[in-house]
Amino acid sequence: MVGQRVAGLPLEQVVGWAEFCGLRITVTPGVFVPRRRTEFLVREAVALARPGAVIVDLCCGAGAIGAALAAAVDRAEVHAADIDPAAVRCARQNLPGAHVYQGDLYAPLPVGLRGRVAILAANVPYVPSEEIGFLPPEARAHEPRAALDGGADGLDVLRRVAAGAAGWLAPGGYLLSETSERQAPSAEAVITASGMAARVARSPDLDATVIIGRRLS
């Protein structure tokens, strides 16, 4: 284990788990490590969710967001999806009572969820491609690039998520996605352009920024 850590593996991948919202989340080598700042997205989602809510954790990685929402929202019906097979294997361990699918964004979700989702949490990659080289070596070398690289301006995946959100959200349902403080105005414009109302939530303590979209009808 010491040798793995000296070689640069993130500590969470070395020990096999990460603490997130008071939960122990299984994390294996090559899987994106849940960030503490993402707990702010969970708090915002919990504040919006009602008991029995249908929740989707899109780009779920190890399933940390879905697991935290399942623990915090009474009788939640949780679904999760990721394109990375290694991440899906982790998510299935962390979400034993949920439905976890492998595929690109909405593609693997069951058609029966369309128009029923109350909370759509999408922790999409949002680092601009040209800035990947500035990330810590732990992230650059040991986490999948697809979980980090958001395209030229960092918003490519968010655009795809926002464009399809209305078809899956229930009327009045919410889309929540993490971004950087610098990107927040552009991310808010992406959500607005998709036909949803949008606002920005910020936690200085966690240095976290979340874009919240709401389906109006």
Image (cartoon, rainbow, N blue to C red):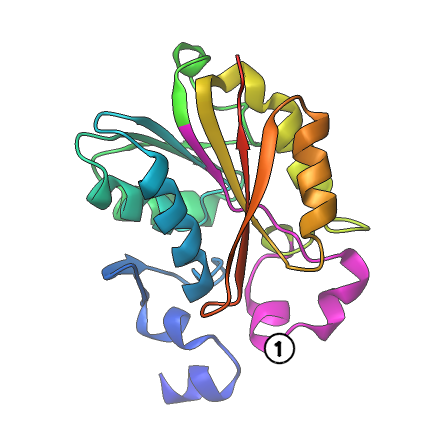
Q: Give coordinates of residue 146: x percent, y percent.
A: 63, 50
In the picture of the structure, the residue carrying the numbered disc 1 is 137
- Numbered disc 1: secondary structure: helix
Question: Is residue 63 in sight in this rendering?
Answer: no
Q: Give coordinates of residue 177: x percent, y percent.
A: 54, 44
Left or right: residue 128 compared with residue 157 = right
Magenta segment boundaries in residue numbering? 119-145
Q: Nearer the viewer, residue 95 or 160?
A: 160
The residue sitting at 77% across, 57% down in the picture is 129
Q: Give coordinates of residue 176: x percent, y percent.
A: 50, 40
Q: Is residue 62 above or below residue 194?
A: below
Q: Amino acid at mark 1?
A: Pro
Left or right: residue 24 compared with residue 3 = left
Q: Is residue 125 above or below residue 112?
A: below
Quarter containing the N terminus: bottom left
The residue sitting at 73% across, 51% down in the picture is 154
Q: Give coordinates of residue 192: x percent, y percent.
A: 68, 30
